[in-house]
Every structure is written in structure tokens, then in C-alpha cells.
Image (tube, helix red, strand yellow):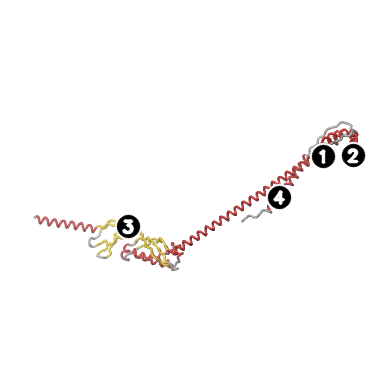
Amino acid sequence: MLPTISAGLVVLLVLALLVIVVLARTVRIIPQARAGIVERFGKYRTTLKPGLNIVVPVVDQVRYVIDMREQVVSFPPQPVITEDNLVVSIDTVIYFQVTDPVAATYEIANYISAVEQLTMTTLRNIVGGMDLEQTLTSREDINRGLSGVLDEATGRWGIRVGRVEIKGIDPPPSIKDSMEKQMRADRDKRAVILTAEGQRQSQILTAEGQKQAAILTAEGEREARILSAQGEREAQILKAQGEGQAIKTVFEAIHEGQPDQSLLAYQYLQMMPKLAEGSANKVWIVPSEIGRALEGLGSSIDEIKGIPRSTGGTRKRTTAPESPATTDAALTEAQSAVARAIAEAESAGQHTAPPAAE
């Protein structure tokens, strides 16, 4: 009885294990952004999508699981010969994505290696038609050329090349030294040019400042001289007018006052002390006939000037009338003359101004 039970239990265990294995081979879970390639008896049957999938155990097999995400592959530096026979080392990075997992599986054995080799050959063709300077300055053109050729060639493999980037272009060490020397010489040249330009601008500004200062100084001196001449002229005009008015007033007062010999003798006596104040007058001798002399002087003046010995009637004091119209007219004339002199001086200063320094 025991052997029979043991044999049945073993059979049950085997059947349970077989069921577990069959279920495990039947249910397949595909991760997100992946695609499973199913083969039946070695032939492509279907493509499994992400999630839970049921396949026929033993008959169907999931041969490949393809990553459908965009991938980034960096290739090692590759030597490339330029048009001017210089060897440069170029690093490239490729961004691609599998769009058809069936074509990527059965159209090419290793699509990553194929993309790498195609990139290197295309890069040599593009750079081979450029010199070193164009290679260093035309990265965008190289990237566009690589992207176009790779996208067209890898389309039948079920791969889409997004873009190709040039990581670095390294020329030979001797070319690097030459380029550094050239760059250093260019920087030194620009520094010398900028320094010379700065000194030139400084000298120009200094000359302009000196010129403006000289012009302002000359204009100030000219205006000062003009104002001084104007003041002196007006002072002389006013002085002459005052003296003329004083003489006229005295003359009118003398004639209107009707002086006689006694008044003239009195004025003569008042002038004698002033005559004695001179430095050359040391001794004065007064004659005993001073009265007769004064009478003779009065008669002589009377005969010459027509002054009578005595006048009748009342005497009156007269004051000199002011003539503001005459004074204002003279001042107006003086100011007009000064204005004309100022205009002539400014015109002369403009004609003789020094030219601006460059």
C-alpha cells in the first residue's frame, strides 16, 4: 500500500511541477518601452507589446527583447585626414531610436556596430573635403551631413538617427602650438592697437580741452578789455560833459550876476594864497600900491571884457539848468559806439580762432 501511495504522490508532484513550468512558459511580461520578438519553430511569429502576454509554451519562444527608447552611443576618437593632409582626431555622439524591432532584429546583425562604422566612413568623407580651418569652424555643417546620411542609411534597419554631435576635434600638437602662437600674436596686436587708440583719444581730448580753455581765456580777456574801455569811455564822456556844464554854468552865472571891479578884485585876492601854494613860489612881495594895482587890473578887465565899474539894480543868483536830454543822448551814443566795438571784436575773434585738433 505504501509503495502505491508513494508512486501516486510522485506523479502528482511531477504533474504540478509540469503545470508550473507550462504556466511560466505561457505567461510573459514585457516591460514598458520594450518589444518582444516571438519565434515559432525558429520563424518569426509576432511582436509582444509591453504588459502581460500569452504564448504557446515549448512551441513559441521570445527570442529578443528590443529597447524602444532613444539611445545615446559615444564612439571613441577616430583619426580623420583633412583636405590639406592633416590628421585630426574627432569624437562623435549619436542619438538614435529603434522604430521597427523586427527590422532591427532581422535586417542587421548588430545595429550599434553598423551605426558606428557608418558614422566613421561618412565622417571621413565629409571632413576629407574640408581644410583644417573649415573643419574647426564648421561643426554644424558636419553634424547636418552626418545626420542626413545616417538617417537615410539606417531607415531600412528600423532605426531613426535623431542627431549627431561632434564632441571634440583635436588637431596635431604642432598645429596646436602654431594656433596658440597665432592667437597670442593677435591678442598682443589688438592690445597694442587699443592702447594706441586710447592714447590718441586722450591726446585729442587734452588738445580739445586746452583749445577750449584758451578760447575761453581769450574771450574773457577780450570782454574784460571791452568792458574796461566802455567804462573809461563813459567816464570820460561824463567828465567832459560835467566840465562843459560847469563852465557853461559859471559863464552864465558871471554874465547874469553882472560883476564889477570890486568883485574881481576880491576874487583876485582869494586866488593869491593858492598861487603861493606852488613849490616854486618861495617869496611874495606885496607892493605898497596894491590898491592902485587892483584898480588898474579891474579897469583893464573892464575894458577888455566890457565889465562895468559898477552895476545898478538888484543882483540875483542863478543855478545852472540841467540838461538831461543832452546827457542821455551822449550816453546813448557812447553805448552804441561800445556795442559796435564789441561786435567788431567778436567778429575778429571768430575769424582768428585756431582750428580744432584732430
Q: Tag 4's secondary structure?
A: helix
Q: Residue furthest left?
A: 1
Identify the mark at residue 304; answer none if there is no mark: 2
Q: Which residue is mark 1?
A: 280
The CA distance from mark 3 to mark 1 is: 137 Å
Q: Amino acid at mark 3?
A: Ala
Q: Tag 2's secondary structure?
A: helix
**Residue at the image position 36 percent from the left and 64 percent from the top:** 116
> Residue 215 placed where, x, y %?
65, 50
Q: Are marks 1 and 2 in contact (CB under 8 Å)?
A: no
The CA distance from mark 4 to mark 1 is: 48 Å
Foreground of the two, 163 or 101: 163
Quarter of the figure that contains the N terminus = bottom left
The CA distance from mark 2 to mark 4 is: 53 Å
Q: Amino acid at mark 4?
A: Ala
**Residue at the image position 68 percent from the left and 54 percent from the top:** 352
Q: Are marks 3 and 1 in contact (CB under 8 Å)?
A: no
The CA distance from mark 2 to mark 3 is: 146 Å
Give whichever of discs 4 and 3 has the lower sequence position: 3
200 vs 37, left or right, is right
Q: Which residue is mark 4?
A: 345
